[in-house]
Amino acid sequence: MLTAYVVITCDLGHEQEIIKALSKLKEVKEVYGTFGVYDIIAKVISDSMDSLKDTVTSGMTAIPHIRSKITLVVIEGQGQISENMAYR
């Protein structure tokens, strides 16, 4: 399984409709609005790199009002915060 986080900037006022559209994509497992440089973050989980690329390119590019996105593919086996460590 491949996991990626996609940080997205969008046109002002269109956050909710983009979040709704992203949540309909099969491989998007979580979507949140954020404060800061980026407006939205989406977690994508896929069985293959081709499928991941298809979701991020074709799937997300088809959504209106997304201005830019950066995809961060997780390196499996390089760290994970457990629930016990989250609040230290």
Image (cartoon, rainbow, N blue to C red):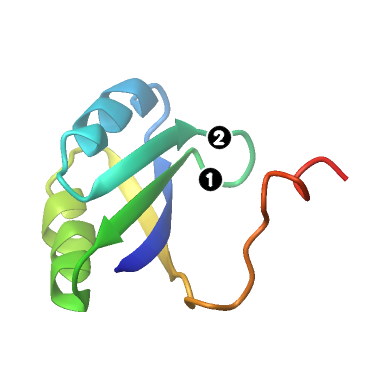
**Residue 30 sits in quarter:** top left
Within-10-Å neighbours for mark 2: few <14, some 14–19, many 20+: some
Rendered residue at 34%/22% (across/down) = 16
69 to the left or right of 87: left
The CA span between labels 1 and 2 is 7 Å
Image: 54 above or below 20: below
Give x and y (percent) for residue 31.
39, 37
Q: Amino acid at mark 1?
A: Tyr
Within-10-Å neighbours for mark 1: few <14, some 14–19, many 20+: some
**Which tag is nearer the camera, tag 1 or tag 2?**
2
Rendered residue at 29%/68% (across/down) = 1
Rendered residue at 49%/78% (across/down) = 75
Q: Amino acid at mark 2?
A: Thr
**Residue 55 sits in quarter:** bottom left
- Determine the residue located farthest toward the front in the rendered image: 84
60 to the left or right of 14: left
Rendered residue at 62%/34% (across/down) = 35
Tag 2's secondary structure?
Answer: loop
Tag 1's secondary structure?
Answer: loop
Image: 10 above or below 56: above
The quadrant of the image that shows the C terminus is top right
* Residue located beneath label 2 in the image: 34
* Residue located beneath label 1 in the image: 38
Q: Are marks 1 and 2 in contact (CB under 8 Å)?
A: yes
Front residue (pair 50, 47): 47
Front residue (pair 73, 57): 73
**Residue 41 sits in quarter:** top left
Image: 21 above or below 69: above
Give x and y (percent) for residue 34.
55, 34
For the image shown, how many numbered marks are present on the structure?
2
